[in-house]
Amino acid sequence: MKSVWPVLLILLLTIHSKADDNDGIESEDGDAAKFYNMTYREQQSALEKKIFYNYRNNRRPVRNVSQPTTVSMHWHVIHVSVNANEQTMTLHGHLYMSWFDEFLVWDPKDFNGVRTARCKKWQVWQPKVRVINSVSGVNSLFEISTQGHALLEMQPDNRAKVEIYPTFSIKVGCLMDFSDFPNDVNKCNVAVFTTEPMSQVQINIYYALPPSLSFAWGDQSKKRIISDFNVVNITNNVVYYSEGNYTELAPIVENELSQTWTMVMTTVVFSRHSPFFFAGVFLPNIIGTLMCVLPFFIDSCAFASFTLVSNMIILSIFLQDAFSKFPLATKGVPKSLIYYDVLLISTTVALLIHIVVMFATAARFPLPDCLNPRPFF
Ligand SMILES: *[C@@H]1O[C@H](CO)[C@@H](O)[C@H](O)[C@H]1NC(C)=O
Ligand SMILES: *[C@@H]1O[C@H](CO)[C@@H](O)[C@H](O)[C@H]1NC(C)=O
Ligand SMILES: *[C@@H]1O[C@H](CO)[C@@H](O)[C@H](O)[C@H]1NC(C)=O
Ligand SMILES: *[C@@H]1O[C@H](CO)[C@@H](O)[C@H](O)[C@H]1NC(C)=O
């Protein structure tokens, strides 16, 4: 009774997809009965044996060693975090890479029409990708995951397309300039390269696609704000490193290739996200300015002095608190901070003028007309 099921299944499949694919069980060459008699494990290990029997994962997978291997790379970024104090940026995501392997070959006809297979990443040759400007020290070896799977897809031209997509978590240092706060825009580069020169391995950007971003799912997929920063855009470009120079022009001459390495530069542009700037910094400064200027129009010198003293207290307590959250200034002091300093000095000077005027009036010292306290209105 049991043996009826495979036959039924074969019949069903033949009826359903008669005209479609000519491989596997419908194929003239395939031996359907034999395949359906094999267990899953038998089929898998037969394929694995076929692929890896003579395979060496440290041999670059080309039959003609003069031909370089081209690795397509795509960055999928799922998080960016910027540490303004440390001046570092950490990028998390998946690094998709694919290339063709001329030794990982099998004939789908021999394996029930199986065209794609999965294996452990270490089993296949892969380009050695390193981060140039990492700040993680010894941990930088683990910034691009070595675990995971490789997807093998047999191509019609007798070679396999290998795809891997390891996760990465890369921390790099960059020079950030916050002197334009709160309108500061900064950019940070993550540069990776292969240890093999261009005569062996070349990297290109997968279909020239810019890095894709997905900081959140579903209706939040438009999210671009992380902490104090708004990620403006992320771009990729390939640069060529040769004899200590970087250039965007690819080398052409054969013997230049062995002296040149490809690098992929991923540039993140981020701007400040500071929604509380108006309420937290701008408005207190304006009120402080008014409280510094208006006392000059007050009739009573004592009352004006009290107002100025309160202004000083307000400025130092409240604004000091607001300004303690300012980013570090590596290049210049933000304009609003300079304004605050000028305001504090002006208030002190205004207070001193009022005190001097008060004492001078009390001592009946002849003051110039403009300094004589008298009602304005
Ligand atoms: C299926 O497997 C059984 C047991 O291994 C064997 O006796 C039989 O001949 C096989 N049938 C075919 C069609 O290979
Ligand atoms: C290997 O590749 C080089 C460069 O493309 C070519 O000149 C050479 O003829 C190839 N050799 C063979 C045996 O195909
Ligand atoms: C990314 O943003 C920066 C700053 O706004 C801009 O200069 C640059 O042209 C943008 N790049 C792309 C590819 O949109
Ligand atoms: C590298 O740059 C330096 C200085 O700009 C220049 O003198 C040198 O010729 C360059 N080397 C190459 C190989 O382009």
Image: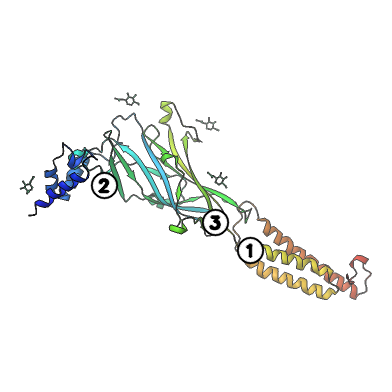
Mark 3 to mark 1 CA distance (whole Å): 18 Å
Above or below 321: residue 143: above
Quadrant position of the N terminus in the picture: bottom left
Which percent across, then down, holds residue 270?
54, 52
- Identify the residue under disc 3: 229
* Residue toward you, 25 or 138: 25
- Identify the residue under disc 1: 323
Identified at 59% across, 59% down, the residue is 274
Q: Amino acid at mark 2?
A: Cys
Q: Is residue 235 visible?
A: yes
Q: Secondary structure at mark 1?
A: helix
- Identify the residue under disc 2: 119
Splitting the image into four quadrants, where does ligand 2 fall?
top left
Question: Counting residues from the N terminus, which is met first, the one under dot 2 or under dot 3?
Answer: 2
Question: Counting residues from the N terminus, which is met first, the one under dot 1 or under dot 2?
Answer: 2
Q: Is label 1 or label 2 in front? A: 2
Q: Secondary structure at mark 3?
A: strand
Please count the marks in the image. Answer: 3
Residue 59: numbered disc = none
Q: Is residue 50 left or right of residue 280?
A: left
Q: Secondary structure at mark 2?
A: strand
Q: Is residue 84 visible?
A: no
